[in-house]
Amino acid sequence: MNIRRIELIDFRNYARAEIELSPGVNVLVGENGQGKTNVLEAMLLIAVGKSHRAHRDRDLIRWEQERARISLQASTRYGDRRLTLELGPEGRRAHANGVQVGRMTEFVGQVQVVLFAPEDLDLVKGSPRVRRRFLDTELGQMEPLYLHHLSHYNRALLQRNRWLKENQASNDDEILATFDRQIAVHGAHVIHRRLRFLQKLRAYAARIYTDIASGRETFDLAYRSSVGGIEAGMTVEEMAEAMEAALARHRSQDLRLGTTGVGPHRDDMLLFLDGREVHAAASQGQQRTIALSLRLAEIDFMHEEMGEYPVLLLDDVLSELDDLRQRNLVVGMSRKVQTVITTTSLNRLGQELDGDYRLFRVCSGIIAEERV
C-alpha cells in the first residue's frame, strides 16, 4: 500500500497544499511550528477517523474558516482509493471513490497507517485510556466489524450511565437488564477481538524488543479485563454471559455511583519487563524501546492480517532514538514500507538514507519539493 497524493484545504495552517509522495521514503523538513506534523495528522485522520492531537474538529480547521477538506489518493492491493473528508459546522462528510459514505465506521480502514510520535511514550506511562485508544485505533483500521461493535457498545453504555445517574433511587432491575444484554453482546465482541490482537502482537513486539535490547530484558504484554472470568480461548458467547453476570453483580454499586464499573471501557493493556509490570518508573530508554517495539510490531501484524504493509509515519522521532540499534531498525523498516518522516534537520538522517528519498521543505504552511 502507498499514498500517492494528498491535498489539504484550510486544514490546520494550510490554506491549500498538495504533495505527491514517493512509494519509498519521503522526508518533510522544516523548523518547528511550520506544519510538518499537520500533514501526518491529515493522513491519520483519513485512515482512522481520529487525530492524535485534537479532540474537536474545530481545532483542525484553519483560523477564521468554516470548513476544511482532506483529499487522498492511494494504491492498495484491492485497487486505487480516492478518499475525501470534509470537516464543517454541520459535521463530517466522507467520500470514497466519489461515493458519499454514510458512517465514519464505513470510511475508516480504507488505508492503513502506523504513526510513531513523541506522544507514544504515553503508551507506557499514561493512563489505561491511552492504551485502550491504541487498541481501538489499530483494530478499527483492520476490522470494520470491530468499530461496529465498539460504536454500539459505547452507545448502550452512554444510555445505561445516563439512566443510572437519573434513577439512583430506583430498583428497576428489568430496565437495567435490558441495557446489560446490549452491553454484554457488543462488549464481548470488543474484548474477544482485543485478546486476539494482543495475542499476535505480543509475539512480534517481544522479538523486536529483544533485538533492540540485545537480550538484556524480555518484554511481554497482556490484557486485563474488568469483567471477572474472562479468559483467552473463550467464545464470544461465553464472554457475553460472563459480562452480563458481572454487570448484574455490580448493579447496586453502579446505581450508588451513577456509572458502569465493568466492561471494556475499564480494561487495560498491561506491559511487562522480565515478568514485572512496567509503570512510569521505567527508564526513559525502556519506555521509548517499548513504544517503538509496539509500533513496529503493528506493521508486521497488519502485513499478516491485510496482506500488505501499512504506511509508516515518523513524526520527529529519529532524533530521539540515540541507540544505533533502534535507528537502524526504523531506517531498515522505512526501506520495506512507504514512509513519511518529519524532521527539523537532515544532517545524519540524509546520510543514513543515502540519498534514496524524496525531500520536501515545509515553511509557514507551504510545501515545496527539493532535489536531493
Image (spheres, rainbow, N blue to C red):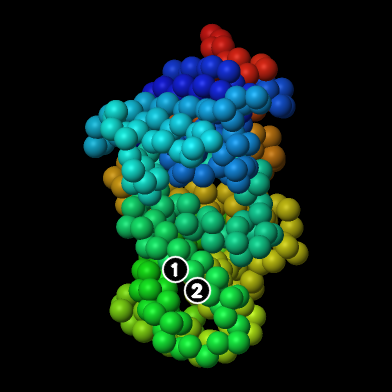
Spatial CA span between label 1 and label 2 = 6 Å
Q: Compare residues 104 and 116 and report the one nearer the observer.
A: 104
Give, as a three-letter code, the residue at label 1: Ala
Q: Compare residues 297 and 149 and report the one nearer the observer.
A: 149
* Residue 372 visible: no
* Residue at x 60%, y 46% (from the top left corner): 55
Badges 1 and 2: C-beta atoms under 8 Å apart? yes
Q: In this view, does 55 lie to the left or right of 180?
A: right
As displayed, is residue 195 above or below residue 38? Answer: below
As displayed, is residue 118 above or below residue 164? Answer: above
Snapshot quadrant of residue 164 = bottom right
Q: Compare residues 324 and 116 and report the one nearer the observer.
A: 116
Quarter occupied by the C terminus? top right
Snapshot quadrant of residue 236 = bottom left
To which residue does mark 2 refer? 160
To which residue does mark 1 refer? 156
* Residue at x 66%, y 26% (from the top left corner): 63
- Density class for disc 2 (Cα within 10 Å; few <14, some 14-19, many ≥20) is many
Query: In terms of secondary structure, where does tag 1 sit?
Result: helix
Count of marks placed on residues: 2
